[in-house]
Image: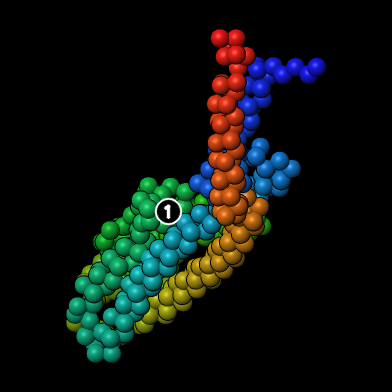
Amino acid sequence: MTRVATNGNFQSALLSLMTAQSRAQQAQERIDSEKIATNMAGYGRGAEQLTSLTSTQARLDGFISTGETVAARLSAQDLALTRIYEGGAGARDAIANGLGAGNITNLMTELGLHYQTVQGGLNAEHQGAYLFAGGQGDVAPAKAATLADLATAPSTASTFANDTLKHKSRIDEKTTLETGFLASEVGGPLTEVFRNIQAFQNGAPVTVNGVTYTPAGAGTLTGQPDADVTAFLKAQLAELDKANAGLTDQTARNGLMQNHVEAALDAQQGQKTALQKMMQDKTGYDPAQAITDLQQAQVAIEASAQIINSLKNTSLLNLLR
């Protein structure tokens, strides 16, 4: 005769109830997260591939973050370089207009203002650090605040406080760009011209390209320029043209790097989008299927609960009473 133990039936029904509850919880988690599982263990054999995809995504996010930072810095450098060029171009126009009009009474005042523009560009900041200071971003690279400070400096080089470390940025797996510029390189030629003009105004002889220009005395850069003053200023015009051309080249180089970084960012964003779709395909769970699984689990829970309730009423203890 086959014997049926009440305790065994209870254990079986209880196990079925617990299994159904676990399935219901899993289905609910899938509905909430829209993913197959909330950890790698839930993906089984696909966990290794997902780990690789996640690692790739993290690297992409890192490069995108770096690229955005570099793009912002290059944009700030473009504005600063443009400002320096405006100062140099303004100085050239002031000299040319004065010579053309035969009157340079206000020339030194105008040049002082244009030098302020140049110095402002050289000391431009980005995110709390000086752009053209090299590795010591907390020190203003252009030290001479006025033309008078320039003239009293022992040399043009002594008016710059930047070091020689140029900022570099790795924008993808294989590309590292030297995105930094140094104030002494960017503004050195222009600063030399301003310094020479102020020295000449102070009465000191100035040598340009092997030719020495000696002023008649201090304060000669005013009124109607004589032949010596005109020759000197024309020599400075040529030096300003060279300095401004060099600035144009630096600005163009900065622009090329901007284009390169933007292209890299576009490519990385495309890769990220494709990777996200791939991961969604691997980890995503059909919401309709999850709801169906939840409903089936709930039915199983109700059935198991009814069985347990029935077993409570069919116990041998009840018959013995």
Query: Which secondary structure lies at badge 1?
Result: loop
* Quadrant in which residue 194 is drawn: bottom left
Q: Position of residue 132 (x, y in %)?
A: 43, 57
| Amino acid at the residue labelled 1 | Ala
Note whether 32 is above or below 180 in the view shown: above
In this orientation, does residue 125 appear?
yes
> Which quadrant holds the N terminus?
top right
Picture coordinates of residue 279 (x, y %)? Answer: 63, 54
Q: Residue at x 39, y 60 (%)?
A: 156
Residue at (78%, 19%) from the top-left corner? 2
- Residue 127, percent from left and from top: 37, 53
Nearest to the observer: residue 8 or residue 279: 8
Of residues 109 and 258, the one nearer the viewer is 258
Q: Is residue 207 visible?
A: no
Seen at 64% across and 30% down, the residue is 16
Foreground pick, 294 / 242: 294
State left or right for residue 92 relative to residue 102: right
Q: In the picture shown, does residue 290 fall above or below 315? A: below
Q: Is residue 57 left or right of residue 232?
A: right
Q: Is residue 113 left or right of residue 43?
A: left
Q: Quadrant of the C terminus?
A: top right
- Quarter assignment of residue 174: bottom right
Query: Picture coordinates of residue 57 (x, y %)?
Result: 60, 52
**Residue tagged 1:** 133
> Which residue shows up at 55% across the image and 36% down it?
302
Furthest toward the top, the residue is: 321
Query: Is 148 in front, or is 134?
Result: 134
Q: Is residue 105 above or below residue 267?
A: below
Q: Is residue 227 above or below residue 279?
A: below
Residue 287 lies left or right of residue 114; in this view the side is right
Residue most extreme to the right: 1
Task: Give the number of marks.
Answer: 1
